[in-house]
Image: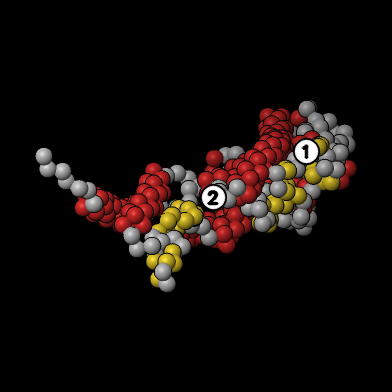
């Protein structure tokens, strides 16, 4: 009612409300550099009015709910883009390592070995009976075989490294889902008590974003403040306060780790996140390169063996295999490639059996310009492989850059809503300070008036 005591109550309540607002503003300023922090605001609510004697008197103000300024739609879009970015980034990183194995400018490719081998044959054709030139051919052939061997071994090692990353990422996924489930329980408990679990929600959003960087996820909000997380194909990861662990088991065919949810193999259905990019590189990108490399090694070995068998060696004997025959189907030909002869006189350079005849070595040289590798010459087949790798890397780079640009736009939009602005908070602080001071002044005046009223009612005794 309109009394001095009610006015004092209104002023005191206003001071408490402004004090709460100042506290929230101070917390915003303190967390200006805290990753994942969402700006909070204090809702000022008009206190319920009081009706007395047919009149309605205002009840003042009170601090309402402390609300985090977040845009859930933008956050979901950012999580979706984080999934894509994680996949592109891990796939690109793996394929760039593949590209390094074929870097001709640094001498790590096969081009120099291929050219060196055919050049040695060209030199031998000038003097087919020269043992030094014959030994040079064997040395060049061994260098070529070793180049195939090392390149294949490096690709396989890279696959094994990626396979290890798959296992590590699955462990990280399990750790994150466990933490999210714990936060779900804490948030639901706080909601049930009527508390605002803003800090807990911030922590959960950070963890969900990290999870999205590892594996594609879908999010469903529950009425109690908790969330349900599944993979994009519907495999449960978190439901309320319960998390569901993924596991890895070796594939019976290639020995690489497959990802399981319970007893179900979900490897092929994983989309988004670094896990998807690693699986794509391990199971598709590198095998494609290995297949092309094996085809080149198998075709070259088979063709050279066929030509060498058609001629006679320096001792007049029929030629045999020049390279060790590749495995059936050509799978693993690059890793198994080796020179079958060690005696330079066994190179079948002649067709007519004479030592000076170079007809058959010329047939070997001619392989350089024949479509022996799926209709392509050896050098063109190798160039196609280099182009295939370069095109894959270029496409992945383009996709990653586009994803990064979208992510930055979303982060900027989220920052405009949820980010802390020092200038804005400073202005709010001044506003709340002045309101507090004004309320305190009202309280002081009411207190003074109350004292005066009390003094008016006292009787002064004169002796």
Crowd around label 2: few <14 · some 14–19 · many ≥20 (10 Å)? some
Residue at mark 2 to residue at mark 1: CA–CA distance: 39 Å
Q: Which residue is mark 1?
A: 248
**Location of residue 81 with respect to 135 vertically, above or below:** below
Q: Quadrant of residue 33?
A: top left
Out of 5 and 119, give the one closest to the viewer.
Answer: 5
Labels 2 and 1 touching (C-beta < 8 A): no
Out of 345 and 273, give the one closest to the viewer.
Answer: 273
Q: Which residue is mark 2?
A: 196
Pair 2/1: label in front: 2
The residue shown at (75%, 40%) is 245
The residue shown at (36%, 54%) is 9
The residue shown at (76%, 55%) is 234
**Percent x, y for residue 439?**
30, 55
> Could one spot residue 272 in this view of the protein?
no
Q: Quadrant of residue 402?
A: bottom right
Quadrant position of the C terminus in the picture: top left
Q: Is residue 16 left or right of residue 285?
A: left
Q: Residue furthest left?
A: 463
Q: Is residue 172 left or right of residue 355?
A: left
Q: Residue furthest top?
A: 343
Q: Is residue 132 left or right of residue 254?
A: left
Q: Which mark is residue 154?
A: none
Quadrant position of the N terminus in the picture: bottom left
Crowd around label 1: few <14 · some 14–19 · many ≥20 (10 Å)? some
């Amino acid at each position: 009612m309109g009394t001095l005591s009610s006015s004092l109550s209104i002023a005191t309540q206003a001071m408490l409300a402004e004090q709460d607002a100042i506290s929230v503003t101070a917390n915003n300023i303190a967390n200006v550099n805290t990753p994942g922090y969402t700006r909070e605001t204090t809702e000022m609510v008009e206190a319920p009015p009081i009706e007395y004697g047919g009149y309605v008197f205002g009840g003042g103000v009170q601090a309402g709910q402390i609300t985090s300024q977040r845009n859930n739609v933008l956050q979901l879009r950012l999580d979706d883009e984080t999934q894509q970015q994680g996949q592109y980034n891990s796939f690109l990183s793996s394929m760039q390592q593949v590209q390094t194995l074929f870097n001709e400018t640094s001498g790590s490719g096969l081009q120099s070995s291929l050219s060196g081998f055919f050049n040695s044959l060209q030199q031998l054709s000038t003097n087919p009976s020269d043992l030094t030139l014959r030994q040079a051919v064997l040395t060049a052939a061994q260098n070529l075989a070793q180049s195939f061997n090392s390149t294949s071994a490096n690709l396989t090692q890279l696959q094994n490294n990626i396979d290890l990353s798959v296992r590590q990422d699955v462990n990280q996924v399990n750790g994150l889902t466990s933490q999210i489930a714990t936060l779900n329980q804490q948030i639901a408990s706080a909601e049930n008590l009527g508390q605002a679990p803003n800090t807990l929600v911030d922590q959960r959003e950070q963890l969900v974003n990290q999870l999205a960087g590892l594996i594609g996820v879908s999010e469903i909000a529950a009425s109690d403040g908790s969330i349900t997380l599944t993979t994009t194909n519907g495999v449960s990861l978190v439901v309320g306060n319960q998390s569901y662990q993924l596991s890895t088991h070796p594939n019976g065919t290639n020995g690489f780790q497959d990802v399981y949810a319970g007893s179900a193999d979900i490897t092929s259905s994983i989309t988004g996140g670094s896990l998807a990019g690693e699986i794509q590189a391990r199971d598709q990108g590198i095998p494609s390169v290995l297949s092309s490399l094996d085809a080149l090694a198998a075709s070259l070995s088979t063709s050279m063996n066929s030509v060498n068998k058609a001629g006679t060696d320096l001792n007049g004997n029929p030629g045999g295999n020049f390279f060790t025959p590749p495995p059936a189907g050509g799978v693993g030909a690059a890793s198994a490639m080796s020179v079958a002869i060690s005696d330079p006189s066994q190179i079948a350079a002649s067709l007519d059996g004479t030592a000076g005849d170079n007809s058959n070595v010329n047939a070997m040289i001619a392989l350089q310009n024949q479509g022996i590798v799926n209709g392509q010459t050896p050098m063109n087949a190798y160039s196609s492989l280099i182009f295939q790798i370069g095109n894959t890397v270029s496409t992945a780079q383009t996709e990653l850059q586009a994803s990064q640009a979208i992510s930055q736009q979303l982060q900027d939009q989220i920052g405009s809503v949820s980010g802390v602005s020092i200038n804005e908070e400073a202005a709010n602080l001044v506003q709340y300070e002045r309101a507090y001071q004004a309320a305190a002044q009202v309280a002081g005046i009411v207190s003074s008036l109350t004292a005066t009223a009390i003094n008016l009612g006292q009787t002064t005794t004169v002796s």
